[in-house]
Image (cartoon, coloured by chain):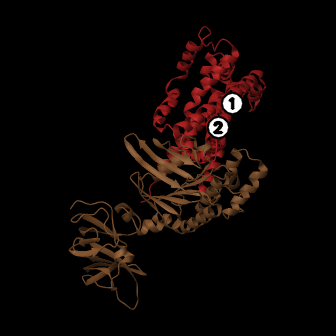
Amino acid sequence: MAFLEIANLRKTFGPLSVVQNFELAVERGEFVSFLGPSGCGKTTTLRMVAGFEGPSSGTIRINGQDVTRLRPNQRNVGMVFQSYALFPNMTVAENVGFGLKVAKRPAAEIGPRVEEMLRLIKLPTLGGRYPYQLSGGQQQRVALARALAIKPQVLLLDEPLSALDAKIRVSLREEIRAVQRSLGITTVYVTHDQEEALSMSDRIVVMSEGRIEQIGTPFEIYNFPRTRFVASFVGTLNILRGRVADAAQGRIAVDDQEIVAARGIADGQAGQIRSVALRPEAVSLADAGGERNRMRGTIEEVNFLGSVVRIRVRFKENAISLDTFNNPSVAPPQRGQPVTVSFAREDLLVLEGAEAG
Amino acid sequence: MKRSKLGPWLAIALGVLYFVVPLIGTFEFSLRMRRGEYSFDAYQVVLADPRFQATFAYSTVLALATIVVGVLLVVPTAYWIQLRLPKLRPVVEFITLLPLVIPAIVLVFGYLRIYNSSSLLPMTASERATDVLLTFSYVTLALPYMYRAVDTGLRAIDVRTLTEAAESLGASWATILFRVIFPNVRVAVLSGAFLTFAIVIGEFTMASLLDRPAFGPYLQLIGANRAYEPSALAVIAFIVTWACMGLIQVFARGARGMSAESR
């Protein structure tokens, strides 16, 4: 049995359905991220797990116990907020020890636990400071320590790094992951930043318009997106529209040039219009030989980005972008130049669902 | 082009004259009790008067009771409005403004009609019950000031997130209110408290018509029968009010310093 089980969860606000049929099983010690754009229902789902929102239907179980109707203060769930939410009238140590004090733990237990938490977040000397005397990154680390001090069953983080600058975000996400690993705590992390989700998570739940689009490891989500939404939301992706020539063999015609998807075309029929996806890094400007897909086109745009040169090649209706490393001894190609691009058949992903012609 | 500063300075000078000259006049007059020389005789007479001490003590006690009742009524209400019922905010704001629009005399006649000794709830039947009624009427009078002060304080903090953070750490509603919310609106509550104190100390209508020995009716009584003492009392009343305003400034400055550092 999974440690955190969310079954058939729904949330509606009047006629608006913000979370629909959400099903998820999180194993003990797993780090799962909810990834999606604003308004996709990821924060509402997290808030239902925390108990701040009541679901319209469905159940939430933590360690086998049904917590769906329990108040937030009865769930033993740690929460870290985007805006830190440290109590301004309390010192760092008082903030970290607040949950233990509320639980009426003896002072002999609270003191050492607070010290342990402050050491864990690498701020052992700042216990006497007030939140306004700390930087944003330090405040968020204190918020993490405060949430962990009560030894919660599940740790929930609601876009905890969004208010921080880019450099601190990167270092803090590594710290959060290290702390989570060292404690082995089951964690749900909400973010709209794909890089955060990809770099931190054991699994990612990609959401759109209140629905789960795909659940998978970062490797699966990035390399094998199942829907057009996942493909376009996670990473940069080329989407090409073509007509299925032979579904079993995975042959599809894109702008009159036939290419092959090694995995075939699931539920495909000849003549259907389908979308295929291709990562820029899978495309090569040179013809690498072997059993690869090849397409002829014209260079439409060349963007010099420093270490990388991004090139867009136009066929007819469709175009693809590809990245090549900058080589100081080779000049980048010119606009209008005819080229052949190639890519492995395994790298071509056929997205679910036929489209109108 | 450099604009002339004469106009603004003239306006300030006129304003200062308008407000300060009567005060100086009152103060100067209060010092003239002894014929031919200035003295604090009027102040000595007033401060030695047992009725002054009794009425001032009575009003002080009622002011403190009003502050306690007002804070216990207003803070949870404003907190709940901000947290759960933000749509009701305009309605509550309107209600809290009513005491500014409805004259105190109308309010007190309403009280006398509803709570007279032959009513279902005869609050005017005994002195203690009338004191309670007077305290509640003072809470009503001070409501616009107390509510606004507390509401402003609550708007300055992220009430919802702080509440949720405390809840997720296992805190009950009482713990959240008394350990998290109250301490963070302390300055706002103190501002409301000092304003309440200043209002209650000088209030006349309610206390007079409910026949209670408060400082306001005493001021009126002295004013009707003495020459120099009323001026001394007016100056004392002003000093009490100004001390309250000064304390608000002191506490507010402390809070401003703290929030400025946090940015």
Q: Which of A341 and A2 is in front in this view?
A: A2
Point out the image quarter for the C terminus of chain B. bottom right
Tag 1–tag 2 contact (CB < 8 Å) = no
Which of A34/A85 is in front? A34
Report x, y in % for residue B153.
57, 43
Q: In this view, does A97 lie to the left or right of A198?
A: right
Which residue shows up at 38% across the image and 77% down it? A282
Question: Residue B126, relative to residue A120: is it above or below?
Answer: above
Q: Where is residue B143 in the image (x, y as percent from the top left)?
A: 57, 31
> Measuring 76% from the left and 27% from the top, which residue is drawn there?
B47
Chain A rendering hue: brown
Q: Residue at x 39, y 92 (%)?
A: A329
Q: Which chain is red?
A: B
Mark 2 Cα-neighbour bin, 10 Å: few <14, some 14–19, many ≥20: few
- Residue type at the position of mark 1: Leu
Q: Which mark is residue B64?
A: 1
What numbered label is drawn on residue A7? none
Please give the residue where the numbered disc 2 appears in the rendered image.
Answer: B174
Image-quadrant location for residue B105: top right
Q: Is residue A300 shown to the viewer in this render?
A: yes
**Left or right: B16 in relation to A311:** right
On screen, residue A267 above or below B164:
below
Task: Indicate the amino acid at tag 2.
Answer: Ala
Q: Determine the chain carrying the residue at label 1.
A: B
Q: Is mark 2 on a helix, strand or loop?
A: helix
